[in-house]
């Protein structure tokens, strides 16, 4: 083996379920790793190749990190040679911070600040500002009023005075304190010659504003109403706002603070109008826009405006002089070049100021890919996790073109993928399997795509080169319809949509066309409101949906939203706790003779409370290691070695297994182990039915992909599913799934519909769309160019109509 022959040589890979495999992977190529979910693709691409590249990198740059690296552990592999440095573009991990935006992820924000600082048009008399002055996250740039947040918390008259027909004596100013303090304030107001008997809405505007908002605190001689104290006393006035702000900043009582918060609303900062910038920076423009406006318009508009500026000749008078200097041209060219890549990737509808927490995983991954393209690295391996996830085929093509450009500039692309179109484009395929977990972990095939046709054993090959046409399916007819008339939110403007009930519907369209907005926000919110349920996402409640007539919602008694949000954000929640199965297991352990003899109850077997758990790691099994700037690196706990429990607890066994050993079982293994326990079997069967038999019971929520989290939620629903009138809403349930797993999932969804429920999925996957009874296609484009219903009907009829989805459906038919 040598390093220079253009191959990465792997010998004896044994990470997770990998069965001591040897393989050679070509460099400078698009290499796709395939196989059913749980087969070991990620264990090879991320767990072995990327992990080893990263470990070598840190060893070379920071020898002192070696001890820490040893703690984290090297991948379990015999030898790897010919391995260049690697960069991972992974979807699953890393919670986005709420201050990061499209602009910061792509680093375009820095560039724009430089542009405004060096080449912006300044108001007369204002000196040039530093680039930092254009960032709300720096001391120099932050608006003094809102500290750069763009929002302030303040009182409003509506909140302070909920019933303006009341007089002050009757408590018009609800925000004021009660009891004697309130009585005191009323006496003071009376002493100021304001009538406290008149209804609030008959007082003069000046008086009302003074009472609510003034900072003045006059002292007034208060004559006690009942003449106990002879001379009275001086009392200090507090306006309603001053009182509330005082409670919020001074009070130690949570109850008082909670009460005060009822009168406070968060609103756009009036000084900076939400930009978070200090006023002088907020006044500088470029191409006619302030930096705050530049952050708010779609990327596509930025490119158009800047291009226009460049084309204008220096003397035409169309652009301000500062904007046509050499510096301005250089920076604008750079901005345009970077924005163009984002436009190519179909992201022109995003704005720079868009918060990263509102982006889909596919959108953020594409942003990061575009950023890498500009970084000019060569000779590295990019390891990607399902880059096609969440993409309409019309958007997947430009993404593949960008990957080709990364390859052309001398890099290797190692991609974990399920999408058949992407697999077909690969130079080389590595198929792992044939099954999942212990049934997988072998090298099924390694070579050019065509060769996979001859590999009987490969599940991927069967889908890539189908031997028989899929059998025709009976399309269901709807029981009735649900109509949303004139709905508006984000890019939906007055759109009217009819959803068929009692069938399965796919909502399709290019990225940004409005699918998620329509299904997981508008529709979900309307049905939830109808059912009188409170939203589980308080932020969603704030985004008020604007809607006209609604009919047909009476058909449901339940709404089930199965999205890809994580099932938990800490390693304390896992598959077993989320499904409720762990309660059953803990009771089984508590019921053993050994537990009874020791007085152990079910809580002894919880790793979340003191008693049975390992106290070194407090039941986490891991301790976090500060490893340079690598966030959240964990090493196994040195006391319990990952078992999470103390020795005494581990001495108790059920059918010869300790509680830690049970948590280490896969769902498949546990199904056999608990075969005689019906309540456990129900959960386990539901998990296997959606293709999750390979997961371990104790697998922490933080290790699960969005797709796995979504299927766990679905399985949890299925274990309690009854015949019924529920509405199931799913956002891209097939993302992260091998075609074989998609088939399993579709079986489950069809059963739900057969049992009388309605299923609506947001989808790009061809097999899923054609398995539906009805298609609603949104578009025609993304962002402002979308938000309309382009076509609706059966999959066959939509395939014959106009639009990007029709093309996609028709192509597959041919
Ligand atoms: P794929 O990427 O093909 O879906 P993975 O490589 O993620 O598959 O998983 C392969 C097998 O290894 C599965 O059985 C999975 O449960 C197991 N596995 C994954 N991560 C871990 C881990 N951190 N510890 C132990 N087993 C794991
Ligand atoms: P799709 O699901 O079809 O990809 P979305 O419903 O996510 O489309 O987005 C439709 C439009 O609404 C896009 O222009 C997107 O930028 C915008 N949008 C989506 N979510 C938000 C949000 N939380 N805040 C502001 N705009 C949003
Ligand atoms: Zn402000
Ligand atoms: Zn421990």
Image (cartoon, rainbow, N blue to C red):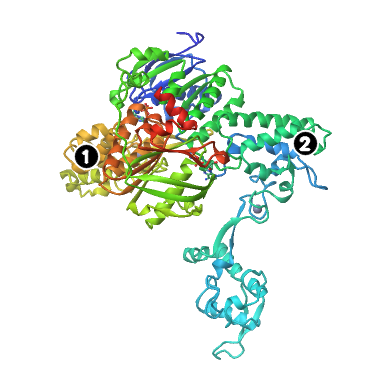
Q: Give coordinates of residue 191: x percent, y percent.
A: 64, 83
Looking at the picture, does residue 143 appear above or below residue 668?
below
- Determine whether the beta carbon of the residue marked 1 sits less than 8 angstroms from the nearest atom of ligand 1: no
Give the residue at mark 1: 681
Give the residue at mark 2: 323
Mark found first going from the N terminus, 1 or 2? 2
Q: Is residue 685 left or right of residue 508?
A: left
In depth, the one of 552 and 221 nearer the eye is 552
In which quadrant is the N terminus drawn? Answer: top left
Q: Is residue 163 left or right of residue 577?
A: right
Q: Give coordinates of residue 406: x percent, y percent.
A: 56, 21
Residue 640, image quadrant: top left
Q: Give coordinates of residue 323: x percent, y percent.
A: 77, 36
In depth, the one of 427 and 186 nearer the eye is 427
Q: Residue at x 49, y 34 (%)?
A: 362
The quadrant where ligand 4 appears is: top left
In depth, the one of 286 and 444 nearer the eye is 286
Q: Let me know if residue 35 appears in the view.
A: yes
Q: How many marks?
A: 2
Looking at the picture, does residue 130 appear above or below residue 402?
below
In depth, the one of 433 and 573 nearer the eye is 433
Residue 702, image quadrant: top left
Q: Give coordinates of residue 159: x percent, y percent.
A: 54, 66
Label 1 neighbourhood size at 10 Å, few (<14), some (14-19), many (20+)? Answer: many
Q: Nearer the viewer, mark 1 or mark 2?
A: 2
Looking at the picture, does residue 25 appear above or below residue 132?
above
Asked whether the residues under the numbered discs 1 and 2 touch, taking CB atoms below 8 Å apart as contact, a structural biologist would say no
Q: Residue at x 82, y 32 (%)?
A: 314
Label 2 neighbourhood size at 10 Å, few (<14), some (14-19), many (20+)? Answer: many
Secondary element under disc 1, as helix, strand or loop, is helix
Q: CA distance from mark 1 to mark 2?
A: 69 Å
In which quadrant is the C terminus drawn? Answer: top left
């Amino acid at each position: 083996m040598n390093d220079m022959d253009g191959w990465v040589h792997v010998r004896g890979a044994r990470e997770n379920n990998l069965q001591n495999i040897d393989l050679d992977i070509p460099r400078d190529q698009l290499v796709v790793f395939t196989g059913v979910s749980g087969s070991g693709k990620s264990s090879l691409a991320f767990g072995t190749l990327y992990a080893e590249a990263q470990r070598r990198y840190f060893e070379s740059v920071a020898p002192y990190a070696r001890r820490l690296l040893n703690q984290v552990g090297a991948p379990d592999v015999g030898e790897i040679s010919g391995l260049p440095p690697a960069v991972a573009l992974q979807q699953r991990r890393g919670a986005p911070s709420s201050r990061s935006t499209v602009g910061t992820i792509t680093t375009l924000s820095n560039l724009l600040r430089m542009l405004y600082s060096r080449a912006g048009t300044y108001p007369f008399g204002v000196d040039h500002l530093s680039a930092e002055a254009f960032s709300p996250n720096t001391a120099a740039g932050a608006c003094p009023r809102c500290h750069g947040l763009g929002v302030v918390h303040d009182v409003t008259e509506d909140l302070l005075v909920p019933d303006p027909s009341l007089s002050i004596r009757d408590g018009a100013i609800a925000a004021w304190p009660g009891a004697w303090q309130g009585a005191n304030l009323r006496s003071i107001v009376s002493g100021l010659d304001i009538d406290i008997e008149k209804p609030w809405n008959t007082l003069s505007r000046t008086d009302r504003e003074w009472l609510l908002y003034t900072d003045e605190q006059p002292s007034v001689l208060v004559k006690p109403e009942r003449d106990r104290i002879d001379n009275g006393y001086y009392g200090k006035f507090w306006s309603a706002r001053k009182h509330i702000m005082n409670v919020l900043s001074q009070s130690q009582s949570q109850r008082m603070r909670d009460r005060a918060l009822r009168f406070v609303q968060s609103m756009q900062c009036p000084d900076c109008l939400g930009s978070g910038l200090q006023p002088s920076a907020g006044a500088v423009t470029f191409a006619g826009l302030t930096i705050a406006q530049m952050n708010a318009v779609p990327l596509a508009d930025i490119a158009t405006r800047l291009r226009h500026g460049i084309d204008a000749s220096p003397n035409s008078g169309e652009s301000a002089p500062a904007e046509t200097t050499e510096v301005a041209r250089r920076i604008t060219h750079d901005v345009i070049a970077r924005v163009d890549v984002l436009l190519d990737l179909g992201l022109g509808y995003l704005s720079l100021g868009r918060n990263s927490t509102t982006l889909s995983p596919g959108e953020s991954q594409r942003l990061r890919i575009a950023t890498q393209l500009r970084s000019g690295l060569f000779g590295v391996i990019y390891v990607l996790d399902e880059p096609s996830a969440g993409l309409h085929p019309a958007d997947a093509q430009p993404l593949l073109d960008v990957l080709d450009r990364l390859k052309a500039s001398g890099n290797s692309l190692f991609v974990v993928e399920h999408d058949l179109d992407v697999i077909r484009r690969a130079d080389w395929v590595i198929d792992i399997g044939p099954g999942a977990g212990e049934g997988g972990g072998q090298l099924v095939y390694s070579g050019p795509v065509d060769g996979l046709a001859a590999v009987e054993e490969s599940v991927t090959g069967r889908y890539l080169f189908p031997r028989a046409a899929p059998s025709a399916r009976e399309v269901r007819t709807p029981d009735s319809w649900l109509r949303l008339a004139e709905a508006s939110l984000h890019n939906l403007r007055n759109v009217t949509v009819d959803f068929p009930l009692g069938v399965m519907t796919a909502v399709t369209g290019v990225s940004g066309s409005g699918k998620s907005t329509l299904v997981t926000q508008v529709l979900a919110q309307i049905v939830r409101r109808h059912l009188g349920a409170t939203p589980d996402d308080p932020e969603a409640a704030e985004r008020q949906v604007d809607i006209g007539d609604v009919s047909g919602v009476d058909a449901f008694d339940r709404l089930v939203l199965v999205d890809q949000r994580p099932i938990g954000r800490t390693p304390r929640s896992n598959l077993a706790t989320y499904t409720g199965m762990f309660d059953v297991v803990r009771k089984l352990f508590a019921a053993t003779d050994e537990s009874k003899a020791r007085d152990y109850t079910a809580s002894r077997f919880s790793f979340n409370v003191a008693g049975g758990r390992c106290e070194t790691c407090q039941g986490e099994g891991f301790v976090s290691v500060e490893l340079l700037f690598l966030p959240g690196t964990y090493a196994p706990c040195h006391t319990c070695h990952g078992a999470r429990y103390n020795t005494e607890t581990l001495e108790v066994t059920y059918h010869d297994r300790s509680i830690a050993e049970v948590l280490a079982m896969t769902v498949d293994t546990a199904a056999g182990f608990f075969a005689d326990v019906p309540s456990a079997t129900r959960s386990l069967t539901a998990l296997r039915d959606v293709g999750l038999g390979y997961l371990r019971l104790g697998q922490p929520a933080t290790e699960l992909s969005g797709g796995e989290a979504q299927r766990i939620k679905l399985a949890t629903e299925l274990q309690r599913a009854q015949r019924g009138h529920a509405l199931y809403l799913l956002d891209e349930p097939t993302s992260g799934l091998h075609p074989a797993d998609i088939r399993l999932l579709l079986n489950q969804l069809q059963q739900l519909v057969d049992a009388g429920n309605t299923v609506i999925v947001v989808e790009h996957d061809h097999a899923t769309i054609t398995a539906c009874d009805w298609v609603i296609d949104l578009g025609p484009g993304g962002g402002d160019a979308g938000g309309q219903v382009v076509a609706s009907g059966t999959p066959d009829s939509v395939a014959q109509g106009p639009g990007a989805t029709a093309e996609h459906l028709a192509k597959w038919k041919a």
